[in-house]
Image (cartoon, coloured by chain):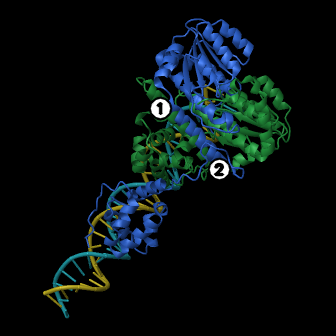
Chain colours: A blue, B green, C cyan, D yellow
Amino acid sequence: MAKSPKISASHEPGGLIVHISGLLPSLSPAEQRVARLVVADPADAARRTITDLATAAETSEATVIRFCRSVGMDGYPQLRIRLAAEAARRVEPPDARVVGGDIPPGADLAQIIATIAFNDARAVEETAEQLDPAVCEQVVDAIAGAGRIDVYGAGASGFVASDFQQKLHRIGRTAFYFPDVHTALTSAALLGRGDVAVGISHTGTTSDVIEVLEQARARGAATVALTNFPRSPITEVADFVLTTAARETTYRSGAMASRLAQLTVVDCLFVGVAARNRARAKKALEVTAEAVQSHRVGGGRRRA
Amino acid sequence: MAKSPKISASHEPGGLIVHISGLLPSLSPAEQRVARLVVADPADAARRTITDLATAAETSEATVIRFCRSVGMDGYPQLRIRLAAEAARRVEPPDARVVGGDIPPGADLAQIIATIAFNDARAVEETAEQLDPAVCEQVVDAIAGAGRIDVYGAGASGFVASDFQQKLHRIGRTAFYFPDVHTALTSAALLGRGDVAVGISHTGTTSDVIEVLEQARARGAATVALTNFPRSPITEVADFVLTTAARETTYRSGAMASRLAQLTVVDCLFVGVAARNRARAKKALEVTAEAVQSHRVGGGRRRA
DNA sequence: CCACGGATGAAACTTACTTTCACGAGGCGT
DNA sequence: ACGCCTCGTGAAAGTAAGTTTCATCCGTGG
């Protein structure tokens, strides 16, 4: 048996617990008692104070310290922290979450929340992964240099369109959004070369939006489509196609994840455009933020 | 004295960091310095001793302790351990430098996309983690049983409010949204017992929204606040407080991740309400989907 | 039987953490 | 403007936690 040398003090990256149980037999009896407690419930051990742990292991604090050294730690605090980290990492079994699918009928709210969040986050991540930076770049170029930008969208996508319009507007780009097809058509008819029209439709089949985009294109504007389906009708009237990756099948999950995915794309474009002229965008944002300042209470600090 | 009331000390199961950044604005300057260090590098903070951390934050140990209490911990050791656990759980961000913060000036579009997606997804996940299902349940109950639901929101949060209204409406709940304060106030004045008012404000300081919510409450309606900051003024006029967990610091990233977080919460409530009466909600959704069918081309069929 | 070495816990000691307190700044009512 | 009060703050005192030292104990081998 070894005389308690520091064993691989620096490297047991895989698992501290494993490491400890590995050299458990080489520890002295009293230290073994400590080790067993630690291995049995790392999280609990991390919560205890050294005195507490010593008592639980029916030994003295000194032995606990010796144990720490034996397993390569500097002292008890370090062990505690490592233990806490370890415990946190292992409690990560992704409990059967409903991927992409429907919410089960009997689900309680906690499950619902977990499922929605999971799918929403997924949609955002996957959308970003499949976004073509080159196409984005072109769209950003077009928008940054545009005389005027029209953003079209109906229903749920309308909110996104409106959000995009508002964002662009805030950084000083001339952008419009129309909740109404007729107005939108009118506007599209007035677009020309150098202008940009953005059509947002999750399904890519919203005739109103397609129609407007078509009009815009006929007038010489650059047209951008944002849809979940790369071969949907809307893509046929668009110079640039950006796609989201929300894989919601049922109508019910319907406009949920897709909105978030769309918004993510909008954010990317927005930041891209803003980055083209940081100084100006920053200034514009400051000015606009200031403008609403008087509608806020408690300026800086907030208290309960 | 009970100067700094523990805010949901027990309930921030997943996101301590998130919890802290939410509370950040409500902390005193010296505590904020500590908080920023902690949020910036939790793992590092966990390694430090209290004196060390105090020095780094250019303050005294006493303030660090106060900070611990402010965020619901018993003392520094507990914070350390929680921090270590948190840091361990945290996945390595795709690009180390762009977490939670700003987009670096020289970034290319691919980086921008990755950064935004990462932060957006994180906001969604962390929001879900810290959402209190019990409170959600109560809100869902209230909405499901409400005679009428008003949803208030201004600026970026207005889109979210509007989205929520539309969703509720689609499943047959009587819901309203008002883009204009005066109309909203008028409506709030007409609310009564059994009605629900939902106020959405990222900062929690939007006076228009607070005012309207206050009015609604005075009339006996149940009031719900959705904000990123659990101690902001809006929470004082709300019976139920739901918080998002977008830790965007700069005004520039501003309304980006927070919208997504808000929408996630909205989705959860929506599905929760819909689940109360699946049959009816399903029917309503089918009917409404059918209604817009004629505005789609290609009969919904998509080649993908 | 004694010498020896390792294991162990009591106690001394050091360091970390927590509480108390007084001071000073900023706000509020008079 | 004045003084009062509250709140944030760090210095310092106090307490608890962690660490070291050391004497004791026990088994082993001479």
**Of A209 and B167, which appears nearest the observer?**
A209
Q: Label 1: state its secondary structure.
A: helix
Report the disc number at residue A146.
Answer: none
The structure residue drawn at horizontal position 47% and vertical position 56%, both measured from the top left corner, is: A90
Report the Cα–Cα distance between label 1 and label 2.
Answer: 28 Å
Q: Is residue A208 left or right of residue B72?
A: right
Name the quadrant containing residue B292: top right
| Amino acid on which the number 2 mark rests in the picture | Gln
Q: Is residue A79 above or below residue A232?
A: below
On whether disc 1 and disc 2 are found on a single subunit, the reply is: no
Question: Which quadrant would residue B139 be assigned to in this image?
Answer: top right
Residue B111 lies, in percent from the top left, at 44, 28
Q: Visible in this render: residue B141?
A: no
Above or below: residue B66 compared with residue A6: above
Q: Where is residue A72? Give x, y as percent.
A: 32, 60
**Residue beneath the point at 65% across and 34% down:** B204
Direction from residue A87 to residue C1 in the image, left or right: left
Q: Chain of mark 1?
A: B
Q: Which residue is mark 2?
A: A111
Q: Which residue is mark 1?
A: B114
Which of these two is toward me, B115 or A227? A227
Q: Residues within 10 Å of mark 1 (few under 14, many from 20)?
A: many
- The spot of residue D9 in percent (x, y) is 49, 41
Q: Amino acid at mark 1?
A: Ala
